[in-house]
Amino acid sequence: MPNQVLETLANQELQERDKLESAAAEMRAYAQAAEREMVSHLGAFSRSERMKQRAQAVAARTRGRASVVINRAQRRLALAKARVNQAIRTARRRSRHLASEHPAEVIATVAGAAFVTGILLRFWRSSHHA
């Protein structure tokens, strides 16, 4: 009888070991599946992070280039304004000089320009309303 008890105990021990091994195999399979899923999610996360970083880098470069273009345009506009203001000051100075030094010629020039403009307007009006 003691042999039978020993055999029964040995069989039970083998069955328990098989159950433990099968549970361990199931746990390993579950852990591997969880690890694969985690890695795939992390890969997607890192890809989205990389894309986000790339987009931020492109945006920063674009902002930098835009600010360079804007600064260049502002300098050119300021230079153009300065040139126009200088031309206006020069024209005013010349007109004041001409008006004070040669008033008769200025009046004659303005009257002649008005007369020629009136004739041209009359021809244009008659050709469009005939």
Image (spheres, grey):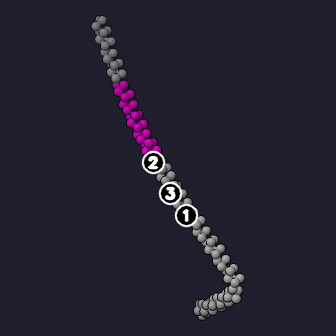
Task: Check if residue 35 falls in the magenta segment.
Answer: yes
Chain-order first, disc 3 or disc 2 = 2
Residue 3's place in the image compared with 121, above or below, is above
Q: Secondary structure at mark 3?
A: helix
Q: Residues within 10 Å of mark 2 (few under 14, many from 20)?
A: few
Which amino acid, mark 3?
Arg
Are the residues flagged by discs 3 and 2 in contact, CB closer than 8 Å? no
Disc on res. 40: none
Residue that badge 2 annotates: 51
Q: Nearer the viewer, mark 3 or mark 2?
A: 3
Q: Quadrant of residue 93?
A: bottom right
Which segment did they paint magenta? 22-50
Residue 13's place in the image compared with 41, above or below, is above
* Mark 1 → mark 2, Cα distance in angstroms: 32 Å
* Mark 1 → mark 3, Cα distance in angstroms: 12 Å
Disc on res. 65: 3
Identify the residue at image location x=57%, y=63%: 75
Q: Secondary structure at mark 1?
A: helix
Q: Residues within 10 Å of mark 3 (few under 14, many from 20)?
A: few
